[in-house]
Image: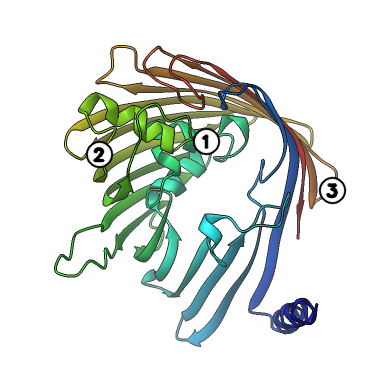
Amino acid sequence: MKKSLLAFAVLGAFAGATSAQNNVTLYGVVDMGVNYDNGRDAAGRTWSLTSGQLNGSRFGFRGIEDLGGGMSAIFNLENGFNADDGTLTSGGRLFGRQAWVGLNGGFGSVKLGRQYTTLFNALLAIDPFGVNQAGDLQRIYGYGLGRVEPLGRSDNTIIYSTPKFGGIGASVGYKFGETAGSFNSKSSKFAGVDYASGPINVMFAYINTDGIAFAPAAGTTAAVPSAALAAIVAPTGLDAVTANANVRSAFLGAVYDFGVVKAHLGFGDTKLSALGEAKIRNYMVGVTAPLGADSVYASWNRNDIKELASGTSHQYAIGYVHPLSKRTSLHSSLGYTKNDAGVRLNAATNGASDREFQLGVRHLF
């Protein structure tokens, strides 16, 4: 009991200190909802209370200090948690979503620490679902590899981003593998270019990483990404082999705002290499439309594993958000995944389909 009171006191003191300083902000999201899924578990349909449907539940601290001469110090520490049971996400890390410090100025910005990759930022910007809810592009991209680190978040990373020139910006990053005797082992290299002007936003991202290690088991019914990796590597004979995979992935996407509706388009090409190679193609078409203060959006995603004769998956989804205030919203989404006989994206067994429904509430602070 004393330890709990002490922890709350420390957090309260930290929050008080942040509010007393104009350059540090405490922020967060609490997102909860009811979830129905009928295909992800071989035992049958599942009703659950889940956290982070529209946005991942989190709290964080971000800050900036003016160093003079147009330069500033910046930082972001962001925690992720499951609001349904109070546990931490990202493997139990205190600041598992982001933890970085850097410098910003006329030269652009340099950030060091745990960060989002250029691939994640591109998927987030183009996906009408914002890589969340039942239409999440990230979980189908690369047959689930879009959610796997370091494709999404990256440890031990340095990222340089240029200033904007005529609406164009660029970023390059490097993840240290920290492997004795081998500078490149388990490292990642990535880059991105974005263009935003008027109604159009275009994103391109590329990542090359040796940082994905897995030990897939034949016939596994584990959730994505474990099942996804097992299904991908089975054609190359790796389903019982522990491997450190190399992944090379490129994504190009665009959003165009017509005023009454936004159109979303995306294309991805991914190569997974270990003892063999799997080639994966992704296609996305989506739409977002305002309904007064509300918003409705939908998408179709196709994942195609080229090495499989029956290796195509389709994900169809529609979502809806109704704001109750500036900080509180109700949200809902419905998704359907159809798999060919050789794959099991979002499903427990090859060839099975999956239906998912979500209904929840999100509060920002």
Quadrant for the C terminus, please.
bottom right
In this view, 142 is above or below 173: above
Q: Nearer the viewer, residue 311 or 102?
A: 311
Q: Report the amino acid beneath label 2.
A: Val
Residue at numbered disc 2: 241
How far across and down, in percent of the image, does residue 190 sit? Answer: 30, 53
Residue extending furthest bottom?
68
Residue at numbered disc 3: 325
How far across and down, in percent of the image, does residue 150 sit? Answer: 37, 52
Quadrant assignment, res 324: top right
Quadrant assignment, res 274: top left
Residue extending furthest left?
181
How far across and down, in percent of the image, does residue 221 sit? Answer: 47, 29
Horizontal side of residue 306 vs 62, given as left or right:
left
Horizontal side of residue 210 vs 315, given as left or right:
left
In this view, 228 is above or below 163: above
* Element class at badge 2: loop
Q: CA distance from mark 2 to mark 3?
A: 52 Å
Q: Nearer the viewer, residue 352 or 355?
A: 352
The numbered mark, 2 or 3, whose residue comes first in the sequence reads 2
Colour scheme? rainbow
Quadrant for the N terminus, please.
bottom right
Residue at numbered disc 1: 127
The numbered mark, 2 or 1, whose residue comes first in the sequence reads 1
Other residues around mark 2 within 10 Å, as few (<14) / some (14–19) / many (≥20): some
How far across and down, in percent of the image, does residue 291 sit? Answer: 76, 29
Which residue is found at the position 48% from the left and 45% from the top? 197
Q: Report the amino acid beneath label 1.
A: Asp
Other residues around mark 3 within 10 Å, as few (<14) / some (14–19) / many (≥20): few
